[in-house]
Image: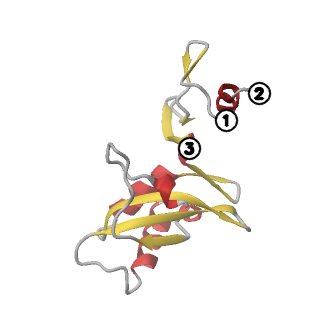
Amino acid sequence: MSSTRTARRCRPTPVEDGWSIPGDIFVMREDVRLGYKSHRDNLIISSGHNIPGSEIKVVVEEHESVSEVAVIAIPDEECGNIVKAFGVLEDGYDGTGGLVEEIQNHVKNTLEPYKYPREVDVVQSLPRTETDPPLATELSE
């Protein structure tokens, strides 16, 4: 099998039969409009629940102590995967005194409780791409 076929099987081409295949996931709302949920590469499946990493990222960033965050899935024997967040803190915060639990509770109280990050690591900076967005894939290594 050629490498082109293997790559195509693992990751769809951007255009197939004239249709754009970006890998985005949408849901149909009650009012029949489509609502964006996540990119397929950023969907975390934990205990059978589909958890968009981008949704967790937005809520964690709402916390006053967090300046930026990246969210990934990490393997877990019981759940399949769990949500893990890496957060860079604002000046004046050091990650002690129950701050991690406060961030977790903020997510639980804002979204469905099963979506909260089971692990939160405080980091000095996040790895970045050449165009500057945080590169979450390097965090999973």
Residue found 71% across the figure and 26% down from its top = 2
Q: Label 3: how many residues lie within 10 Å, few (<14), some (14-19) or many (20+)? A: few
- Coordinates of residue 40 in the picture (x, y in percent): 57, 41
Mark 3 or 1: in front is 1
Residue situated in front as seen by the camera: 43 or 113: 43
Instruction: Please give the residue where the numbered disc 3 appears in the rendered image.
Output: 41
Q: Amino acid at mark 3?
A: Asp
- Coordinates of residue 30 in the picture (x, y in percent): 54, 35
Q: Which type of secondary structure does the marked residue at label 1 adopt?
A: helix
- Coordinates of residue 3 in the picture (x, y in percent): 67, 30
Return the disc, 1 or 2, that comes first in the chain's sequence. 2
Location of the C terminus by quadrant is bottom right
Instruction: Please give the residue where the numbered disc 2 appears in the rendered image.
Output: 1
Q: Residue 10: which disc?
A: 1
Q: Which type of secondary structure does the marked residue at label 2 adopt?
A: loop
Q: Residue 72: which disc?
A: none
Return the disc, 3 or 1, that comes first in the chain's sequence. 1
Return the disc, 3 or 2, that comes first in the chain's sequence. 2
Q: Amino acid at mark 2?
A: Met
Q: Amino acid at mark 1?
A: Cys
- Coordinates of residue 97 in the picture (x, y in percent): 38, 87
Mark 3 touching mark 1, by CB under 8 A?
no
